[in-house]
Amino acid sequence: MQKIAFFVDGGYFVRRIKYYHRKHFQACALEPHHIVSVIYNLVRKHQENLGRDQLYRIYYYDAPPLEKQIRYPRPASGHQTPGTWNCKKESGYIFQTELHKQLRASRKLALRMGKLSNSGQWQVKDTVLRELLANEKQFSDLTNDDFYYSVQQKGVDTRIGVDITTVTLNHYADTIVLLASDADFVPAAKLARTHGVDVVLDPLWGNVDSDLQTHIDGKKSFDLVNQLKHILGHEPEPRPKWWTE
């Protein structure tokens, strides 16, 4: 058997693609179908690199977008009480909803959905927090743009563990590729390696949790700037200094 399976941390995957888009392709829009194209391009590249021509399945893990109406943390200028934030009108909600719709219709791809916690809270953005700590900004100067709403996903790590265990113990694939970076995949990766499965990590050039780094058989990432160049039909601007395309 020479089959390969892919396990994608959806939230992390989209953040990494948006990072390269924001840095090098701001002149053109990034749409949900572009994300889907990047997934299949990377699957094909890993198959070629590892010599695995049979794709068992792609597992994509995510949670639905937030659908609540929430009070902003700060009142707008000239108001005494904060206004209401309607999540469904946000571009992020529309993007994620359409992405999930396209993933459900994609071949050889299983969309595994967790849930969002019932409780969340507003958090100060990291860059703003550093400014506050350095006394470069005062709390009284903060606006709603300086905050983001944080809510935890639930059930995703359980689904990851069940799927990798099922693929491993039933011998559905002898190689798995993790497109991820954090420790949620560690227990399942350990089990897979114990049963002789080749575990390859693609962190998309991001930082890798040290525990995950310990429990893989190899690490490989491909040129995401080149991927986006061909998918978006635009040259990167600015061009990365390391880029030779």
Image: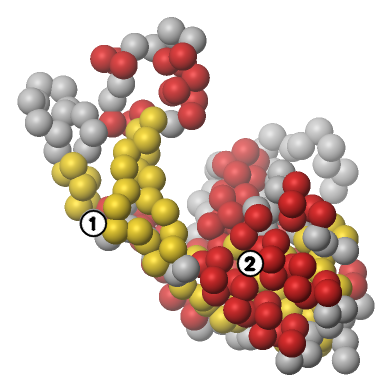
| Camera-side residue of 197 and 71 | 197
Q: Is residue 55 visible?
A: no
Residue 190's image quarter? Answer: bottom right
Task: Assign the N terminus to one quadrant of the image.
Answer: bottom right
Residue 8, disc: 2
Q: Is residue 82 visible?
A: yes
In the depicted structure, whether residue 193 falls above or below residue 230: below
Residue 55's image quarter? Answer: bottom right
At a point 88% along the width and 64% down the height, the residue shown is: 217
Question: Where does residue 62 sit, x and y in percent of width and height?
Answer: 50, 66
Which type of secondary structure does the marked residue at label 2 adopt? strand
Question: Where does residue 201 sit, x and y in percent of width and height?
Answer: 78, 61
Crowd around label 1: few <14 · some 14–19 · many ≥20 (10 Å): few
Residue 68, disc: 1
Query: Separation of disc 1 and disc 2 at Cα?
Result: 26 Å
At a point 18% along the width and 42% down the height, the residue shown is: 71
In the depicted structure, whether residue 227 falls above or below residue 37: above
Question: Where does residue 104 sit, x and y in percent of width and height?
Answer: 49, 80
At a point 45% along the width and 23% down the height, the residue shown is: 129
Left or right side of 184 for 216: right
